[in-house]
Image: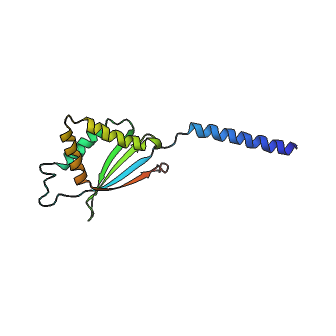
Amino acid sequence: MRQTLFVAATLFCMHVSTHLVAQETKEPNPVIVTTWMFTPPENGDTTLKGVNVDSLVMYYIDKGVRPNTLIKNFRILTHYWGDDNFKILFIYEIDGFGNIPKASNKTSELIDASFKKDADKNLFWKRWERIFNRHEDSIMANWGTPKM
């Protein structure tokens, strides 16, 4: 009986201490990696007439990503060397797993709100979808801190 009580008390203490430690440890922020497939304009395509792709991307960042408080970190990676130079990676660190869809929606809302005219907003998104018409999304997490 004494041994059973001891085991029960030990298990109870382990259970309580595990929950206390678990509450103190914050879940790591998810990292969203969106791989955009850049589609260059074709002959006769007037959708991108007079458009600087860098300016379009900077508008997206300045109006949608930077003011979005749910996005904790952001960077863009482009292909550096080799044949496959049509991939552009957007990497977002989001404040909590549950905020992933909220962060995405908020970015779009902020960009939409930055335009005074619906025609300008629609033109922006039409151009965006023309340039970046295919993408892949991945939800990643930190895997510890490597020693360098």
Up the image or down, 135 lies above or below 101; here it is below
Nearer-the-camera pick, 125 or 62: 125
Could you tell me residue 66's position as x and y percent? 31, 37
What residue is drawn where x is 46% and y is 42%? Answer: 98
> Is residue 142 left or right of 109 when viewed as pictured?
right
Give the number of marks: 0
> Is residue 78 left or right of 104 when viewed as pictured?
left
Residue 69's quadrant in the figure?
top left
Nearer-the-camera pick, 61 or 108: 108
What residue is drawn where x is 35% and y is 39%? Answer: 106
> Is residue 13 left or right of 147 when viewed as pictured?
right
What residue is drawn where x is 55% and y is 39%? Answer: 25
| Residue 31 shows in this picture | yes
Most extreme residue toward the front is 118
Most extreme residue toward the bottom is 83
Could you tell me residue 65's position as x and y percent? 31, 40
**Where is the N terminus found, in terms of image quarters?**
top right
Could you tell me residue 129's position as x and y percent? 25, 51
| Residue 65 shows in this picture | no
Nearer-the-camera pick, 31 or 108: 108
Residue 13's quadrant in the figure?
top right
Could you tell me residue 42's position as x and y percent? 16, 60
Indicate the colouring scheme. rainbow
Nearer-the-camera pick, 62 or 130: 130
> Is residue 29 left or right of 22 when viewed as pictured?
left
